[in-house]
Amino acid sequence: KGTTREQRALKYLKEHAREGDPDSVLETFDEFCRTQEWAMNAAEEKGDILDEIVRELRPTTCLELGTYCGYSAVRIARQLSPSARLITVEVNPDYAAVAREVVKLAGLQDKIEVINVDSGDVIRELKDKYDVTKLDLVFLDHWKYLYIRDIKLIEEEKLLKKGSVVFADNVIIPGAPGYLEYIRGSKNYNSTFYSVHFEYMDDMKDGVEKSVYIGDE
Ligand SMILES: O=C(NCCNC(=O)c1cc(-c2ccc(F)cc2)cc(O)c1O)c1cc(O)ncn1
Ligand SMILES: [Mg+2]
């Protein structure tokens, strides 16, 4: 009975990272992915852009779609103010279980809530069930063909306000062409594309898209 890559990563983090130290968890995870096994974390370059967005925006309520092992959840939450929080959604139960352990190892369980559901089901419940009024930051990193469905659901639920930021990973690899066409064609957003390296691959280029909501509340 073998272990999964995600379980091996968690074991490495537990053995090598400093408990309660988010920076150490992230550095150790990057080290694991560079020296042991690749994993689809946002990684250093995309992470630096995410860090800058969080520093500048100072969001109080953040939503991430696509937790995976919790790397970007820890990256976002380590910079959140005491009362701010991140809701992160992962449909894969094995990934969600590992992510909860990584969040706990980083000592961020009071700021991050990992929800193991399909994003399409939870967005409609954010206001009533999760006590969300508005989303200041949305990070799209789940299945790429779902970005466009879910951003439309978020708009329908009127969860964005002027200045809210929607940050999308992988708009080049694997790619999210429908999403890019939609968000860049919409008068409700100002979008910026950043050409970045694909996670842990110094010879592959990916892209991330930052879109600021300027539409009607
Ligand atoms: O795999 C699930 N989600 C990951 C979404 N993320 C990605 O698919 C993703 C993929 C890649 C990627 C790109 C090229 C390549 F050769 C291999 C992987 C990179 C990334 O940065 C991602 O973010 C999943 C499973 C499941 O059972 N249920 C719900 N979701
Ligand atoms: Mg990604």
Image (cartoon, rainbow, N blue to C red):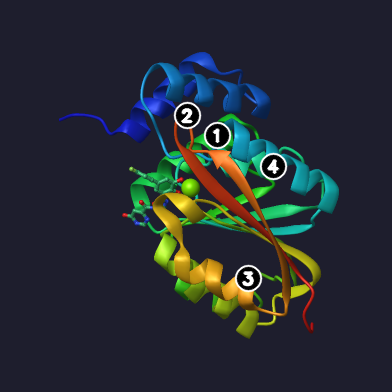
Residue type, mark 3 in image: Arg
Q: Earlier in the sequence, mark 4 or mark 3?
A: 4
* Ligand 2 closer than 8 Å to label 3 CB: no
User: Front-most of 147 and 205?
Assistant: 205
Quadrant of residue 19 in the image? top right
Mark 1–mark 4 distance (CA, rounded to whole Å) = 10 Å
Mark closer to the observer (3, 2): 3
Query: How many numbered circles are shown?
Result: 4
Secondary element at tag 3: helix
Assign the C terminus to one quadrant of the image: bottom right
Q: Earlier in the sequence, mark 3 or mark 2?
A: 3
User: Front-most of 109 and 185?
Assistant: 185
Q: Earlier in the sequence, mark 2 or mark 1?
A: 1
Residue identifier under label 2: 200
Mark 3–mark 2 distance (CA, rounded to whole Å) = 28 Å
Instruction: Tell me the crowding category of disc 2: few under 14, some 14 to 19, or many 20 or more residues within 10 angstroms, Cα based.
Output: many
Instruction: Tell me the crowding category of disc 4: few under 14, some 14 to 19, or many 20 or more residues within 10 angstroms, Cα based.
Output: some
Residue 92 picture location, percent across and down: 36, 54
Residue type, mark 2 in image: Tyr
The reply to whether dot 3 and dot 1 touch (C-beta < 8 Å) is no
Residue identifier under label 3: 184
Residue identifier under label 4: 49
